[in-house]
Every structure is written in structure tokens, then in C-alpha cells.
Amino acid sequence: MLEFILSTLESLGLFGLFIGVAVEALSIPFPAAVFMLAYGYILDPDPISWIWLSLGSAVIYTLISFIPYAFAKRYENWVQKKVKHSKIEKMTRYVKKYGDWVVAVGRVLGMGYIAYTASVSNISSVRYAIFTFIGVLPTAFVMFYLGQLGNIEAVYEWFQRSQYVIFSLLATAIGAYVAYRALRAKKYAKERSSSS
């Protein structure tokens, strides 16, 4: 199956790569990073080509990502009805706390809906473009490089396993934080009741 997919992608050439990147940039759940990984393997780029492929992918992603961003700007009321209010509030809090870097981190994590929430959170189009580019570029560099290493099956399996590890660590950290907050609240309540 993997050989069929690789031969199909190879026959599409760079057009296939850029179509894959564009589809994810439209906020459609689509694994553009896996496409970059596959094309790193297929094209086996030299260092200069590797840089150009990464830059080209990041530019295309950034430009195409303006379609959902502009859609959310134009139809903000409709988008706000469709996106949970809690998600918009959460995104707005993150933007206030961490700034526009939330967009870059969202791109690294593959959060396609970031275009809608960034628009509704009033992140300017220039800053949206800059931070989208900053978020996509390192992913492109890494994926093309890993694909270029040659053992795409091993890299793909490693990528899958590392996601499980990352999500497990994240879940553990969240659990520890919730437990810490609960213990702290309990201690605070106990101190208040003893001082009364």
C-alpha cells in the first residue's frame, strides 16, 4: 500500500506536494506533514532544494490559509455561532497571555481551526501571516529532512509513537496540574475555615 501511495505521489511531482499543503491550509483535516515526509523521501533533495521546498511549502500554506481566515472575517457572526463560544474565549485568553505566538504553535501542532479563531480573536492579517509562516516552516524543514533520511516506514512509525508519547506526557501534565489545583484549593479552604 505504501509503495502505491509513494508512486502516485511521485507521478504528481511538486504539484502533488503543493496541493497537499494547500488542502491542509484550507483548515481541512489533512496530514500535510506526512505529505512533506513522503516528498522528502521521493525527491531526496540536496540541501539547497531542501531549503527551497520548505520555504515554498510554508509560503503556499501561508497564502492559502488566508481563505479560511478571510471567510471567518467576512462571516464572523456565522463562524461564532458554529465555533463553540468557549473555544473562542479560550483562544482569546491564549492570545492575550502568549500573544500571536499561539498561531505559530497551533500550526506546529496541526490545529487547522486556528485560522478561524485567529480571525475572530482579531489577530491582524499581517501578524497572522508572519506567525503562520513561522509555525509551518520548521515543520516543513523537519519533515523533508526526515523523509530524506530514506527509511520512510521507520520514520512514520516513529512519528506515530512520538505523538502517543507527547499526548501521554501532556495528559499527565494536565492531570498533575488539576490535582495540584484541587489540593491547593482544599488547603486554602481548610485555612479559611480554621481562621474563621
Image (spheres, rainbow, N blue to C red):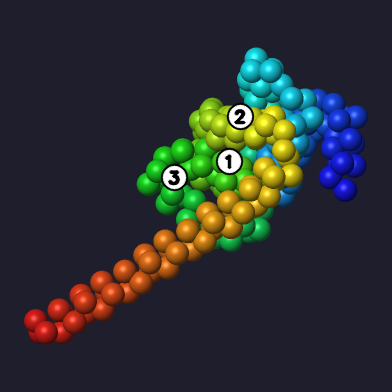
Asked if the residue under mark 1 is in contact with the one under mark 2, i.e. CB atoms within 8 Å, the reply is no
Disc 3 marks which amino acid?
Val
The quadrant of the picture occupied by the C terminus is bottom left
* Front-most of residues 106 and 52: 52
Q: Nearer the viewer, residue 59 or 169?
A: 169
Residue 13 appears left or right of 56: right
50 or 182: nearer the viewer: 50
Residue 119 picture quarter: top right
Left or right: residue 46 versus residue 137 is right
Q: Give x and y (percent) for residue 18.
A: 77, 30
The residue tagged with tag 2: helix, strand or loop?
A: helix
- The numbered disc on residue 141 is 2
Q: CA distance from mark 2 to mark 1?
A: 14 Å
Label 3 vs label 1, nearer the camera? 1
Q: Badge 1 is on which residue? A: 107
**Residue at 15% across / 79% down in the picture?**
191
Judged from the image, the secondary structure of the residue bearing numbered disc 1 is: helix
SS of the residue at dot 3?
helix
